[in-house]
Amino acid sequence: MSTSTKPNHIGRKISRIRELKDMKQEALAQALGTNQQAISAIENSETIDDEKLIAVAKALGVSVEAIKNFTEENMISYFNSFYDNSIANGLVNNANHCTFNPLDKLVESFEENKKLYERLLQAEKDKVEFLEKLLKDK
């Protein structure tokens, strides 16, 4: 039984980093001054030239080395060590915890919108009343 190593598929690495950054192909294409089909072709390519790799790295906000050395295992290890260190140091990781009740914010937003709507509606009623008065005076 032989074990073969995975090829260093640079396009898949670019795709995965883009996804982790919550970026769509269209956004990356726009940053590179190209189209979505060109990004799809890059992500399906096993290799890309250095000039294009530098441009992609810049658009993604990472180094060329980060793309070349990217692995899923490294990402899992990185996030695990971050979580472990925050607990070990007694720090609270607020990035994953809400400090407010989202429903309260939703209700607050609804109430503000309702007040705005009521003011706009009253302004329209005042306009209609004013216009009707003008018509009667003629």
Image (cartoon, helix red, strand yellow):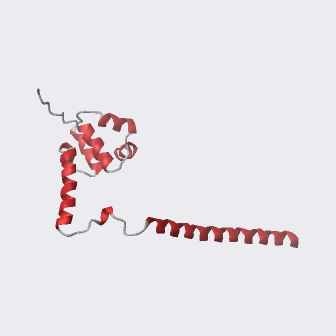
Q: In which quarter of the image is the N terminus?
A: top left
Image quadrant holding the C terminus, namely bottom right
Q: Can residue 39 be seen in this view?
A: yes
Q: Can you tell which quarter of the image residue 2 is in?
A: top left
Residue 70 appears in the rendering:
no
Pick the residue in front: 51 or 60. Answer: 60
97 sits left or right of 104 in the view: left
Q: In this view, does 100 lie to the left or right of 86?
A: right
Residue 23 point in image, percent of width and height: 36, 48
Q: Which of 131 and 115 is in front in this view?
A: 115
- Give the vertical position of 62 relative to 99 (above or below): above
What residue is rendered at 79% in x and 69% in y?
131
Query: Residue at 22% of width from left, 55% of height from top?
Result: 79
**Eyeballing the image, is 41 above or below 128?**
above
Q: Which of 35 and 9 is in front in this view?
A: 9
Image vertical order of residue 122 relative to residue 70, above or below: below
Q: Which residue lies furthest to the front in this view?
A: 1
Q: How far from the left and from the top, in percent, is residue 107? A: 52, 67
Residue 51: % across, % down: 23, 41
The quadrant where residue 84 appears: bottom left
Residue 78 appears in which quarter of the rendering?
bottom left
Q: Is 43 left, or right, of 89 in this rendering?
A: right
Q: Which residue lies most toward the top here? A: 1
User: Residue 34 appears at what percent x and percent y?
Assistant: 37, 40
Q: How many labels does the image show?
A: 0
